[in-house]
Image (spheres, rainbow, N blue to C red):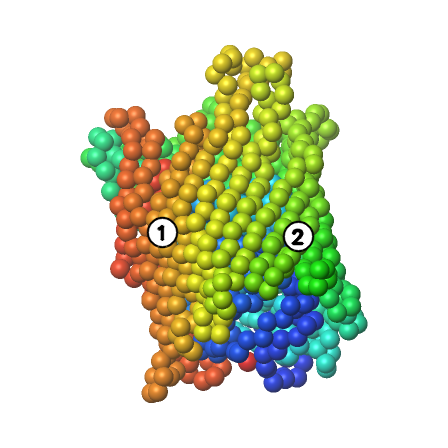
Amino acid sequence: MKQTRVTSLLCLAALLAASTPPLRAQATTDIADDAASGTGGEVVKLDDFHVNGANTYSPATPTVVATKLPLSVRQTPQSISVIDRARLDVESLFSVDDVLKNVTGVHVAFYDTQRPLYFARGFQITEFQVDGMPTYSGSTNQEYDTALYERVEIIRGAHGLLTGAGIPSAVVNLQRKRPGKQFAAAFNATAGTWDHYRGEADVTVPLTGDGRVRSRFVATAQSRGSSRDRYEEEKIAWLATTEADLTATTTLGAGYQFQDNDPTAPMWGVIPRFAADGSLALLPRSTNFSTNWTEWQRDSATAFLTLTQKLGENWIFRATYNRTEGSTFSLRVYASGFPNLTTGAGLWLLAGVGETEDTRDSLDAYLAGKISAFGRDHDLVLGWNLNNLDSWSPTYASITGGTYFWRYDIPDYRTFDGTAPKPTLLKTGASRIAITDQSGFYATARLRPTDALSLILGARLSSWETRTDNYGTTGAYTSTTGAYKVQDEVTPYVGAVFDLNETWSAYASYTDIFRPQNYKDKDNNLLSPVLGTNLEAGLKAEFFAKRFQVSFGVFETKQDNYAVRDASVPDNSLPDGSSAYIGVDGTASKGFELELTGFIRPGWTASLGYSHVNTRRHALDLTYANVPEHLLRFHTNYQFTGALERLSAGIGVNWQGEQSGVGINHPTLGTTTVTQEAFALANLNASYRFTPNLTLTASLRNALDKTYWATLDYPNYGEPRTATVSLRWRY
């Protein structure tokens, strides 16, 4: 089954490796690489540090995710966290779920096995990017496999300058692996609890002797079971990319990446918290009420093309085009009711089916460089981007099994083995295409009035439009519904960074973002978009030659003009039969975040993040409200010296404060409030380097096997203790 995928991918990588003679691998930093990454030519040279042979990212390295200006984390007036390739390998963080569980200020919840939810500053994170470009999201969103990426960047707060519409929570940017000019190869084999098997291959091949044309192929295949009965998942992901230095100043890059997630017996919905008599049901963590025939397949493929042109010594032009096609199909069941602990009866299953095919076209082009004014150098970026998403979905008739819908009553939940009659799926032939188009011009500048002070100013002018085209059972167009547009929406960005000395800087910023809403007031006028704002100020510092960084920030994040029903007029009183709405001040959060990360000394890394957020919501704001106020993220890894120099070991602790859920269904009370006490999860890792090329890594998550709820309003257990062992070979 899955082993054939692993074998075929590894064989393909081996063939690529054999296609060129081995060259001596070495770490290089050059202006061409810097230009291609979009950092605008600002090169930061650092000594190499290693964790069992793996290069590690430094916070001083320029990042462009916030403004496209070549700013380090310290120079950016917002909170940014970075998880680098070394940490991904050391802790065996194989998916973006694994990564975000370890990020300062980010809360990860799970509705079920296939629907993770991510939150920052009281709001859901919905914006994901790859190399700064919007990627598959919504119906085709999936847990990205980290094998394809060099690092993950998370910028918290509003991010409307470059993304346009969205939510003032955070944006997650994944940086793809890129080909180098020297031959390199790495292979990894992993085995773990719950029949977890995984293989990875990563091969870089220069296609010319001088490396001016170079390629990289990365592939992974994974098969894993679960502590949940019957649930398992197959996953494959791969990336093929080529870069060519057409001239000394021109670089062209192209590539293709693919990921497929294919689970069996995935969960949809909840594990009952309460029994029929109102007591706690206390069902085992292995409980899964999905049937043997349920599925939730998702795949996505992205073709990308990038042109980078250096213009003189100080300017660069970069254009990137992405086309992503994704699809999903799910046939799933939902357990409803409350179990009778004596008879085992009381639960029944309801079925649902869903199918989508999404196509996303994204284009981004910008010009970045330096200008001189008033005797000083300043940085400037001018750009434009476009993002079009078409989402097709067919219409299904009722899922048969009874007269109008499928329902199965479980005779005894204690002996349920996933056996139930499979419903008949009937397509009507009708379909719809939801179309969302967004474009915008943006400009940012870093002005340097003095050596110590930087002012970061920017603005975006956005247009946003959506509609749904409907097609009948014969495939003919029938109507357009939900048409709505926003024109000339201005999104400002204002920030300042003041260097107090060579170590410390103070910063402050105001950012915002908008979210369209298709509601009308009692006078039949469209409401303005929801406005999300983020006001932030704090301190940042760099120690030990910029290898260890400290940041502390306080913030206030708000979402205003949130649409709620207007109770002053009757329902359905507008000319089109719809109801009137008014805009109110919606969710607001205040808090602070503290993060310390980097090298304490060569061979010893540490990361500590603590966040506190107090969230206030309007009574009619129905957004997710069960986010804990306090989060702690800690990890440290130490490479021993002397007789134990081949060994490194690490420990991590993820702690969250008390969490409450309101409006939880109860068999006798109707609804109730439930509380989960504060708890901590301990994680362990260790690596042993047999040779400079061969390393064994072990990882143990939830080492104390803590039982906890991954969500409160959709009760589901969190992951129990799991272990993996990986053998990695590098050349």
Which is more toward the observer, 421 or 565?
565
Residue depicted at x 23% and y 38%: 280
Please state which amino acid type lies under the numbered disc 1: Leu
Residue depicted at x 68% and y 63%: 376
Tell me the quadrant of the picture where the C terminus can be found. Answer: bottom right
Residue depicted at x 59% and y 81%: 26
Which is more toward the observer, 157 or 675?
157
From the viewer's perspective, tell me whether residue 66 is left or right of residue 91: right
Give the secondary structure at mark 2.
strand
The 10 Å Cα crowd at callout 1, few under 14, some 14 to 19, many 20 or more, is many
Asked if residue 100 shows in the view, the reply is no
Residue depicted at x 54% and y 49%: 509
Residue 337, percent from left and from top? 33, 31
Give the secondary structure at mark 1.
strand
Measured in 3D between alpha carbons, the distance from the residue under mark 1 to the one under mark 2, in whole angstroms, is 33 Å
Comparing marks 1 and 2, which lies closer to the viewer?
A: 2
Check the image and report above or below for 275 versus 72.
Answer: above
The residue to which callout 1 is attached is 631
Residue 184, percent from left and from top? 59, 77
Q: Quick one: label 1 or label 2, which is nearer the N terminus?
A: 2
The residue to which callout 2 is attached is 444
